[in-house]
Image (cartoon, coloured by chain):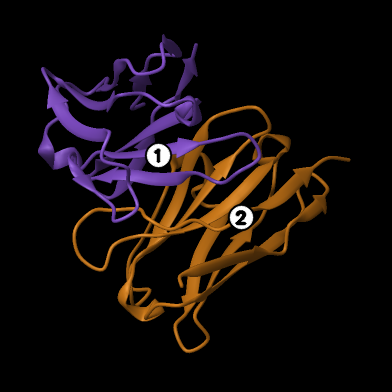
Chain colours: A purple, B orange
Amino acid sequence: QTVVTQEPSLTVSPGGTVTLTCASTTGAVTSSFYANWFQQKPGQPPRALIYSTDNKHSWTPARFSGSLLGDKAALTLSGVQPEDEADYYCLLFYGGTWVFGGGTRLTVL
Amino acid sequence: EVQLVESGGGLVQPGGSLRLSCAASGFTFSSYWMHWVRQAPGKGLVWVARIKTDGSSTNYVDSVKGRFTISRDNRKSMMFLQMNSVREEDTAVYYCARGASSGYVVSYWGQGTLVTVAS
């Protein structure tokens, strides 16, 4: 069974930079996994941030960026704002099916 | 404006059936893959199923294979999830989401509909 792993929680100071990662039990995450990233705040549906590893949607703030970092997909927030406090999920493509990571709860403190 | 509106959720007994609907507007529905994603109370997101633009190809997470069926009606810009033999662990908010016309992206989401499986 494929498992996608994210940091359960991270804390960052306002104005700081934080990187969230997304790993696969099948091995290295490459561009062929077309990593997507989503932000979810309490009581709201998820909001798409990044697709195909490093592409931003038209509504994605410039401080969010996606990349591959070693053998993982990564989401970096630079100049973190208080409103960035949320749960973040990655989504990886496995040649027909998709699998979400367990999510990272980001606290801005 | 892209809009996705789910409906059909509610309380269903274990072993029962339920049909969820997703009404789409604001885009050319027939040009996009569509997905169902669920989220159990207090838990993370789980990808459930996807369907190709013309309905000719579908994929499912293992836990729902043989029990759930995804379908679409492009004339009505609607997507469906037929849920049979439901289990308590199927209790979740079910979201519909728009996939890609080309490429690999999941972009717009509906507000979700709650399915509760309990006796």
Query: What residue is rendered at 33% in x and 68% in y?
Result: B52
Q: Quadrant of the N terminus of chain A?
A: top left
Q: Is residue B110 left or right of residue B18?
A: left
Q: Which residue is mark 2?
A: B111
Q: Quadrant of residue A8?
A: top left
Query: What residue is rendered at 49% in x and 44% in y?
Result: A46
Query: What residue is rendered at 30% in x and 17% in y?
Result: A18
Question: Residue A31: x, y in percent?
Answer: 11, 38
Q: Which residue is mark 1?
A: A38
Number of residues whose C-alpha sits closer than 10 Å to that of mark 2, classed few (under 14), some (14–19) or many (20 or more): some
Q: Chain of mark 2?
A: B
**Looking at this rendering, what residue extends furthest in the front direction?**
A15
Residue contact at pointers 1 and 2, CB within 8 angstroms: no
- The answer, for residue B20, to whether it is visible in the render is no
Q: Is residue B41 above or below residue B84?
A: above
- The answer, for residue B59, to whether it is visible in the render is yes
Q: Quadrant of residue B43?
A: top right
Question: Residue A88: x, y in percent?
Answer: 43, 30
Q: Which is more toward the observer, B115 or A15? A: A15
Mark 1 and mark 2 on one chain: no
Q: Chain of mark 1?
A: A
Query: What residue is rendered at 26% in x and 21% in y?
Result: A23
Q: Is residue A81 above or below residue A37?
A: above
Identify which amino acid the numbered label 2 is placed on: Gln
Question: Residue B48: x, y in percent?
Answer: 48, 47
Q: Kindly report the distance in space between the C-alpha atoms of the residues bearing marks 1 and 2.
A: 15 Å
Question: Residue A16: x, y in percent?
Answer: 32, 15
Q: Secondary structure at mark 1?
A: strand
Identify which amino acid the numbered label 1 is placed on: Phe
